[in-house]
Image: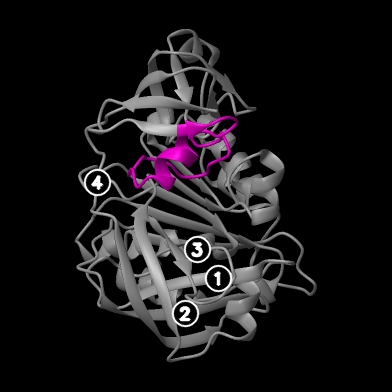
Amino acid sequence: MSFSVKIRQVEQPITVKMGQTILDAALEQGVNYPFDCRAGNCAACKSRLYSGEVEMASYSEFALSQAEKDEGLVLCCRAVPWSDCEIAWLESEDRVVHPLRIMRCTITAKDQMTHDIWRIKIRIDGGGPYTFTAGQFADLEVPGRDIPQRQYSMANRPEEAELEFHVRQVPNGLLSNYVAEKLAVGDLVRVKGPNGSAYYREKDSSPIIGIAGGSGLAPIMSIVETALHAGATQPIHFYYGARDERDLYLVEHFENLAKQFPNFKYVPVLSEPSAATTRRTGFVTDAVRHDFKDMAEFRAYLCGPPPMVNAATALCGELGVIKEKIHADAFYTQAEQTALGGAA
């Protein structure tokens, strides 16, 4: 059994199978629907339900308040239809839409950045041109291998010739383990994108704070470098949380950026240092709370492990950042997505 869902921004209706979310069906059928976390936490896929009935899986109150739900708003990553529906994603003045591309690519470089993070650089061989906005992500897959595609954020600036991805190796992660153990320079991969709404709002001159952990450094790096090299003059702060010194990477790179651009500040924070250190210690959110008492004028970009992103989202709200200026991209593993009932 299936249902027909009319998306007002799309010419043809989509077919949604019983038990499937509207977002999963839309993406399967090539619709460039706005989304990020696919777990009900970021609000990127918030939409208005004009007709029909849906059942909502669990979600965050930050992403959808009771008042919004009462007004007919839903999160498409959690919305499972129980009838034919008509829906529309929420339009915003700063929404960007790039053509979705499926590109043949070649690995040009592979470097181990930490004990569990690998950097790969990719040359586009065909399927372009590829345009994206700093902070967005793409699907990465290895042709000819029975390995599910996974999503990784671009770390490079959009104008740079090669794509750069940071891949964290996770236990039982099929693609991340393949990247770490077998992928080599010269291998072919396929990239499909871009997607994601936690991207750089280049027209806004508000002070910027980026908070990241793990491979969440990648999209923040793209945002920071894009802003700085485009001549942004507002204060830009980047707080990076790691457990220990061995989990930090590209430290010298960001320190050099801070020397080159007086409006940029880089703050690495260690939560569990194994030896004496001169770095800031504790949770990265505690460091932000210590340094800022009022962030009402800020725009926040938050990327990395879900617990850190959720804590940073709550903190930014407490310090006065309005919801519309908090852009969160939590990196769920395949197992976490499955447990939440989202697509793997």
Q: Which residue is mark 1?
A: 167
Classified by dominant secondary structure, the portion drawn in magenta counts as loop
- Image point 29% across, 77% down: which residue? 124
Report x, y in % for residue 4.
40, 26
Report x, y in % for residue 42.
50, 37
Alpha-carbon distance for marks 4 and 1?
A: 25 Å
Q: Which residue is mark 3?
A: 217
Identify the amino acid type marked 3.
Leu
Alpha-carbon distance for marks 2 and 1?
A: 8 Å
Alpha-carbon distance for marks 1 and 3?
A: 11 Å
Alpha-carbon distance for marks 4 and 2?
A: 26 Å
Which secondary structure, mark 3?
A: helix
Magenta run includes residue 28: yes
Alpha-carbon distance for marks 2 and 3?
A: 14 Å
Q: In the image, is residue 54 above or below residue 37? A: above
Identify the amino acid type marked 4.
Val
Q: Which residues are magenta?
A: 16-42
Quarter of the image that includes the N terminus: top right
